[in-house]
Amino acid sequence: MSQIWFTADLHLGHGNIIKYCNRPFLSDSEREQAMHDRCGGWSVSSETVHSHDDALIDAINEQVAETDVLWVVGDFSLAPLEQATAYRDRIRCREVNLVWGNHDLPSYKDIFQRTMEQGMIKHQGQKIWLNHYPMRSWDKSFHGAWHLYGHVHGRLQEEDAANPRLLARDVGVDVTDYRPLSFEEVADYMAPRVKAFRKWKNGLEE
């Protein structure tokens, strides 16, 4: 039986995101430079970009089978179509779907099985609202639908943790050890939140 996986914010081919987010692919000298000037005008090397891209694609292929389904919840790449196609072709999973992110080019439409701005999917009876951007209310949120997002590169981790009944999860690689998350892993994360959500909702209905 095929599994479903989620990831976001790969930014394949995007050197600047590696230094902006201090991803662990920088050389020693680049890491030192990033510590002092993360957003400056300097560029990471092509070797660093290749190492970054290889690691993210390898992490997908190590877990996601050909017959599985992979959702990229935005920001697959910023590369021209030819290069983005080459990235997509290196992913062995046959069904890769894209939720449009702010860095994805319109020309990517034909290299994915399905694309959407945002929307609901359903897996094992669970409704999941996908949007590249984090939301605090979404379709069917009051009825237990989950929300998976990217875009913020982990900046909402503390805010999410402070609201244990929020059925939302950042699936961007910066907070998932640079690998995709399975539905089962997301379900494990949501389990205590679902309990807190139901307790809160039952309190409203008493």
Image (cartoon, rainbow, N blue to C red):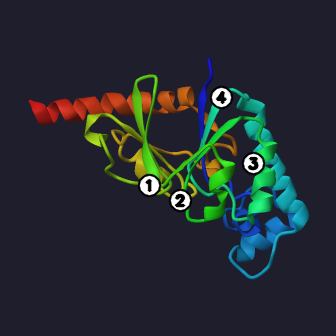
Q: Is residue 144 left or right of residue 132?
A: left
Q: Which residue is mark 4?
A: 68
Q: Looking at numbered disc 4 in the image, what kind of residue is underneath it?
A: Asp
Which class describes the residues within 10 Å of circle 1: few (<14), some (14-19), or many (20+)? some
Real-space Cα distance between discs 2 and 1? Answer: 8 Å
Which class describes the residues within 10 Å of circle 4: few (<14), some (14-19), or many (20+)? some
Q: Which residue is mark 1?
A: 134
Q: Is residue 188 left or right of residue 16?
A: left
User: Would you say the residues marked 2 and 1 are in contact, meaning their CB atoms lie under 8 Å apart?
Assistant: yes
Q: Which mark is residue 88?
A: 3
- Mark 3 / mark 4, whichever is N-terminal: 4
Identify the element where label 1 is drawn.
loop
- Mark 2 / mark 1, whichever is N-terminal: 1
Q: Is residue 73 above or below residue 106?
A: above
Q: Looking at numbered disc 1 in the image, what kind of residue is underneath it?
A: Pro
Identify the element where label 3 is drawn.
helix
Real-space Cα distance between discs 4 and 1? Answer: 25 Å
Q: x and y percent of residue 135 in the render?
A: 38, 54
Identify the element where label 4 is drawn.
loop
Q: Is residue 91 above or below residue 189?
A: below
Real-space Cα distance between discs 3 and 1? Answer: 25 Å
Real-space Cα distance between discs 3 and 4? Answer: 15 Å
Q: Residue at left 52%, top 33%?
A: 186
Identify the element where label 2 is drawn.
loop
- Mark 4 / mark 1, whichever is N-terminal: 4
